[in-house]
Image (cartoon, helix red, strand yellow):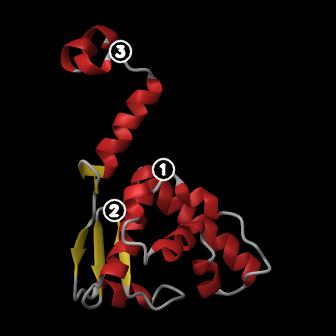
Amino acid sequence: MFQNFAPKIFPDLTNYGIIKRRAIMYNFLYYKQEATPRTPWFFENSKLPIILSYLAPIDIWAISFGPWVWCRGKLDKVTKNHEAIHYHQQLELLFIGQWILYVLYWLKGLITYRNGEKAYRQSPFEREAYSNEYNLEYLKTRKAFAWRNYREINNNKT
């Protein structure tokens, strides 16, 4: 049924294979315009990070949750980039998937290191964001699911 309906609505997609469709969806999710990555909505001078810091094992300065980022104070470009990387990680995993994996990686780290802050830092999501936060062009060249490259930890460096 959908195959007969699709050519009328998406005539330019009918000649593409599944890989092309995924590339089109990826570009729709990540880019507003050509080579301009989507960014979340930023809220500065928020009390939410202060409140969440009482529950978290770290002192939260800024937090990305869905399409929103809340910050205690004024966001600089580096922090905006860090949180935008998290936003893209969440988009890839349809938000809920990233939240679940984030908690699982944190729990794994907590069991391994017995330290909440180290568990937080060793999450592949945080490792990708911290490794690339100073590269303000990173989101323009970032490959989908790049956080997976940060899953393995070289114990000599930690």
The kind of residue on which mark 3 rests is: Asn
Nearest to the observer: residue 61 or residue 20: 20
- Contact check, label 3 and label 2, Cβ < 8 Å: no
**Residue at coordinates 34% horizontally, 35% vertically from top-left?**
24
**Which quarter of the figure is the C terminus placed in?**
bottom right
**Which quarter of the figure is the N terminus placed in?**
top left
- Marker disc for residue 66: 2
Q: SS class of the residue under badge 2?
A: loop
> Quick check: 95 above or below 153?
above
Query: Does label 3 or label 2 sit earlier along the sequence?
Result: 3
Find disc 3 in the rendering and name its residue.
15
Label 1 crowding class (10 Å Cα cut-off): few <14, some 14-19, many 20+?
few
**Residue at coordinates 41% horizontally, 28% vertically from top-left?**
20
Query: Does label 3 or label 1 sit earlier along the sequence?
Result: 3
> Quick check: 22 above or below 33?
above
The kind of residue on which mark 2 rests is: Gly
Find disc 1 in the rendering and name its residue.
144
- How far apart in space, not on screen, are marks 3 and 2 (Cα)? 33 Å
Label 3 crowding class (10 Å Cα cut-off): few <14, some 14-19, many 20+?
few
Whether residue 20 sits left or right of residue 13 in the image: it is: right
Query: Does label 2 or label 1 sit earlier along the sequence?
Result: 2
The kind of residue on which mark 1 rests is: Ala
Nearest to the observer: residue 100 or residue 15: 15
- How far apart in space, not on screen, are marks 3 and 1 (Cα)? 24 Å
Whether residue 129 sits left or right of residue 37 in the image: it is: right
The location of residue 16, given as percent across then percent down, is 38, 20
- Marker disc for residue 126: none
**Residue at coordinates 36% horizontally, 80% vertically from top-left?**
79
